[in-house]
Image (tube, helix red, strand yellow):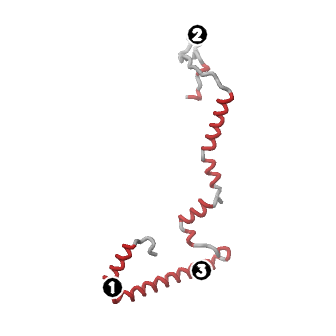
Amino acid sequence: MFFDMGPLEVVTLAILAVLLFGPDKLPEIVQNVVGFLRKVREFSDSAKEEIRSELGPEFRDFEFEDLHPKTFVRKHVLDGDSLGLDEIRSALDPRADLAQVADAVREATTESPREPVTPEHVSLTKDAQSGSPAHAAAFDPDAT
């Protein structure tokens, strides 16, 4: 209950309680608060048991804490792969494809060393005689 409170905050609350209720009424108020918290906890536990019994024997090990969104995601999405998320992640991960391409490039460069390619002067004007580009083979429409 006090896990997210520091010692200074607890001391501050105790001093405030003494100032508000006085030292003579404080033990009675603490007993009333503790009794109220016990009743709330008993009511909560009985409600949980009643819901479990109504759900049937297949939900006997059902925990209500599993319905918390963080716990639900951790249990059903991150830990267990019942939805096939590993296949989706691997299909969307480009690392495997890039590794295959890199291996193919390495094999191609090591198997057949080629002569260096020197760029030629390519004229993009039409020949006066044929009416077609001077070097039609140098033009690649897919590259543009």
Crowding at label 3, few (<14), some or many (≥20) Cα neighbours within 10 Å? few
Q: Secondary structure at mark 2?
A: loop
Name the kind of residue labelled 2 in the image. Answer: Gln
The residue sitting at 33% across, 85% down in the picture is: 21
Name the image quarter holding the C terminus: top right
Which numbered disc covers residue 130?
none
The residue sitting at 56% across, 17% down in the picture is: 120
Earlier residue among tags 2 and 1: 1
Name the kind of residue labelled 3 in the image. Answer: Glu
The alpha-carbon separation of the residues under discs 2 and 3 comes to 96 Å
Rendered location of residue 54, percent (x, y): 63, 78
Name the kind of residue labelled 1 in the image. Answer: Phe
The residue sitting at 63% across, 41% down in the picture is: 97
Please state which of the two labelled residues, at mark 2 or mark 1, is closer to the viewer: 1
Rendered location of residue 91, percent (x, y): 63, 48
The alpha-carbon separation of the residues under discs 3 and 1 comes to 37 Å
What residue is disc 3 on? 49
What residue is disc 1 on? 21
